Amino acid sequence: MLNLTASTILTPDEAVERALACFGGESGMKLVEMAGHIHGRDGAVQVTVTGDSVVGREKYEPLDLLRSILRDMRDRYGLTVVQWQLHFHTLPDETAGHLRVQIEAGHPVDVACESLEVDPQTRDFLDGLPRPEGP
C-alpha cells in the first residue's frame, strides 16, 4: 500500500477535476464512491454517493448528484465543504487494485492518495499538481 501526500495551489474543485481526469474515463479505473465532508460551526455532515447511477424521480449521475447536494448545503445552510473523497477501482477486475484520493480544503490544498497496485499513476498524478512556491 502506497500513501503519498502533496500540497497544491489548485482549488479543491480543481483538484477533484484533475483526479477525475487522471483516474476516470479511459484510465482503466472506475469511480465507485465519492463523498463530501461539510462543516458548520458546531457540527459536520458527510454525504456519500455510490454506484453507477442514483434513481429517484429521474436517473442521476452520482458525481452530479453529490455536487448538487453540496452546493445546496453551502447556499441554503451556509456550510463549507472541507474535504472531498474519491474512491476508484481498477477495471476490468475491480479487485486488482484501488485508489483513494482525499482532498482537503485549505491554503494550500492538501491531496492525499492511498494506492494499491496503481502506484505509478498515483505518483504521476501527484507530481503533476502545481505546487505552492516557497521553502
Image (spheres, rainbow, N blue to C red):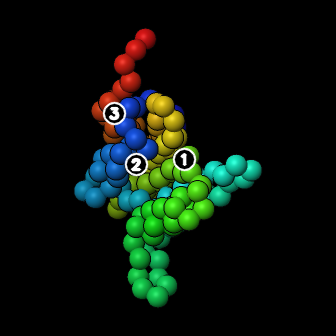
Residue 40, horizontal then vertical, whole percent: 66, 52
Residue in view at x 46 percent, y 88 percent: 57
How far apart are labels 2 and 1 at the CA level?
10 Å
Residue type, numbered disc 3 = Leu
Residue furthest to the top in view is: 135
Of labels 2 and 1, earlier in sequence is: 2
Residue type, numbered disc 2 = Asp
Residue in view at x 43 percent, y 44 percent: 12
Image height of 10 relative to 40, above or below: above
Circle 2 residue: 13
| Secondary structure state at the residue bearing disc 2 | helix
How far apart are labels 3 and 1 at the CA level?
17 Å
Circle number at residue 83: 1
Residue type, numbered disc 1 = Gln
88 displayed left or right of 47:
left
| Secondary structure state at the residue bearing disc 3 | loop
> Closest to the observer: 93 or 107?
107
Circle 3 residue: 129
Residue in view at x 42 percent, y 85 percent: 58
Residue 105, horizontal then vertical, whole percent: 51, 40
Q: Residues within 10 Å of mark 3 (few under 14, many from 20)?
A: some
Residue in view at x 54 percent, y 51 percent: 81
